[in-house]
Amino acid sequence: MTNPLTVVFAEEDTLFRLMEMALLRKLTPQGEKTLTYFFGADFSEPLGVLTSMGDRLGLPRDVKTIVCQNEAEVDAALPHADALVLERTEMPSARIATAAPRIKLIQQFGQDSRHIDMAAAKKHGVTVADLVRFSSLSCADHITALVLALARNLLPAHRRVIAQRDATKGSDFPADPPRNKFNWGQIKDIRVLAEHTIGFIGMGENSGIVARRLRGMGLRVLYYKRTRLTPEEEQRLGGITYVPRSELLEQSDFVSIHVPYEKATEKLADAAFFAGMKKGAYYINTSRGGTCDEKALYEALKSGHLGGAALDVYRYEPVPADCPLLDLDNVLWTPHMAGGRPEFMVRESEDVLTNLARVLRGEKPVGQLSPTRIERTSMLQ
């Protein structure tokens, strides 16, 4: 009797719970909460996709999953892991060595694998792969769109055109030759990106993709984070520049927030933060609403110190009807949609499990970072 395929998830994560259901081919209590959060009460369709995924990919049916809640559980699970899926958990040399006799794949969920000792993985012949998250590409698209919308003043432009509609007038659409009038809506403050600077507070996967794109569009890109990137990493992102936070605020025409919500970042963007920003600059938040003092943002926008804001996240969602920010014309709103459609989360689950299936067949995984160790026999045969 062979041992079950043991897949360890190093952290508690909603996406990992989707992957767990795909491996087990059944609905789990934690998975039900995740599906309800993403899809609402009727999640039968995505559940069907998930529970059929393992067979479709050819993964073994005899599977054991471990979702770790703390570091001690990670250490206890590693000697038994055939595969490890992680996002932030540290994998130093000692942990690699512990896992090495059995493990066939360490799958980084995302592309930031600096917490994995790659030299140790190569030494022990452990396969490590990363993943371009589809939701990260979606977020990057959205953030780029917000920058462009602010720079081109698209929201006021849209409103100006729609204002031409007059229900009191009859149908008298002109039939004479076309006529042109440059900027007939008199849209002010149209900006050319190549003459401007964007500053990122935090530089992770989403902001890294955006930074590389915007560098290609001619923007100067500044960033601030607690641990500076290496010169090689800065260059890979198009040649971005690290500066202290105060300098970033002073120099940036756009400031985009990319930090997790925690005690240290509660109302990170407060009155002093906005006062330190360049006059007429734009504030963008697609990370977490709790990082912003919305009252301070309202005052900075209403006074004219800031040129505008683009918000995808808020302290309370949906936005309360009496939120003062709703009264301002210089705020561009989106309803927490940067990550895209809920189906993207199912797609990311399949990307991870596809890599696992490839490795179990003795194939090279997508996004391989360390040498593949080919087993004598395939667990999928």
Image: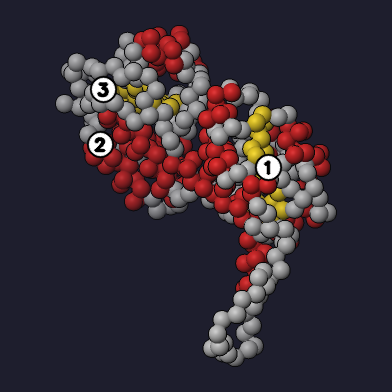
Q: Position of residue 147 (x, y in %)?
A: 62, 50
274 over 101 or under it: above or below: below
- Label 1 vs label 3: CA separation? 53 Å
Q: Is residue 299 visible?
A: no
Q: Is residue 238 visible?
A: yes
Q: Residue at the spot x=62%, y=73% of the render?
A: 162
125 over 286 or under it: above or below: above
Q: Residue at the spot x=58%, y=22% of the render?
A: 230
Q: Quadrant of residue 223?
A: top right
Picture quarter with the N terminus = top left
Q: Quadrant of residue 16?
A: top left
In the picture of the structure, the residue carrying the numbered disc 3 is 4
Q: Position of residue 128 (x, y in %)?
A: 38, 22
Badge 2 or badge 1: first in the primary sequence: 2
1 or 3: mark nearer the eye: 1
Q: Position of residue 299 (x, y in %)?
A: 81, 51
Q: Residues within 10 Å of mark 1 (few under 14, many from 20)?
A: many
Instruction: Kindly identify which numbered label has been placed on residue 197.
Output: 1
Is residue 63 toward the left or the right of residue 231 in the image? Answer: left
Badge 1 or badge 3: first in the primary sequence: 3
In the picture of the structure, the residue carrying the numbered disc 2 is 57
Q: Quadrant of residue 349?
A: top left
